Image (cartoon, rainbow, N blue to C red):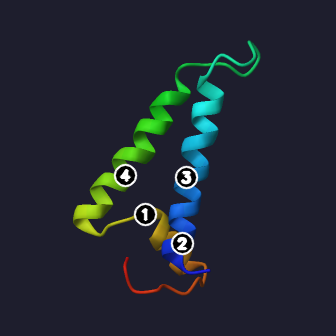
Amino acid sequence: MSVERMVLAFAGFAILLSLALGWNISPIFHNANWLWFTAFVGANLFQSAFTGFCPLAMILKKLGVKPAGTF
């Protein structure tokens, strides 16, 4: 799996997880502040579309994951 696909998979997972944790499913896990994490991930995806800078992509490259050329 390339860096780009791993970034997209992680972003999708993080958004879905934080939305589930922000939703009032259970009083134990429910906290509306998880929606701030959703906004952070979305904003990071938005800025990386214009700048090409992605912190997760840099971390994955240092861990040895092969890039496909986008980031």
Q: CA distance from mark 2 to mark 4?
A: 16 Å
Drawn side of residue 62 relative to residue 54, left or right: right
Q: Residues within 10 Å of mark 3 (few under 14, many from 20)?
A: some
Three-letter amino acid code at the position of disc 1: Pro
Q: CA distance from mark 4 to mark 3?
A: 12 Å
Q: CA distance from mark 2 to mark 1?
A: 14 Å
Q: Earlier along the polypeptide chain: callout 2 or callout 4?
A: 2
> On screen, 16 above or below 30?
below
| Cβ–Cβ under 8 Å for marks 4 and 1 | yes
Three-letter amino acid code at the position of disc 4: Asn
Residue visible at 65% across and 29% down? 21
Residue visible at 44% across and 46% down? 41
Identify the image quadrant of the C terminus.
bottom left
Residue wearing tag 4: 44
Residue wearing tag 2: 5
Residue wearing tag 1: 55
| Cβ–Cβ under 8 Å for marks 3 and 1 | no
Q: Earlier along the polypeptide chain: callout 2 or callout 3?
A: 2
Identify the image quadrant of the N terminus.
bottom right
Q: Nearer the viewer, residue 57 or 38?
A: 38
Q: Residue furthest top?
A: 27
| Cβ–Cβ under 8 Å for marks 2 and 3 | no
Residue wearing tag 3: 12
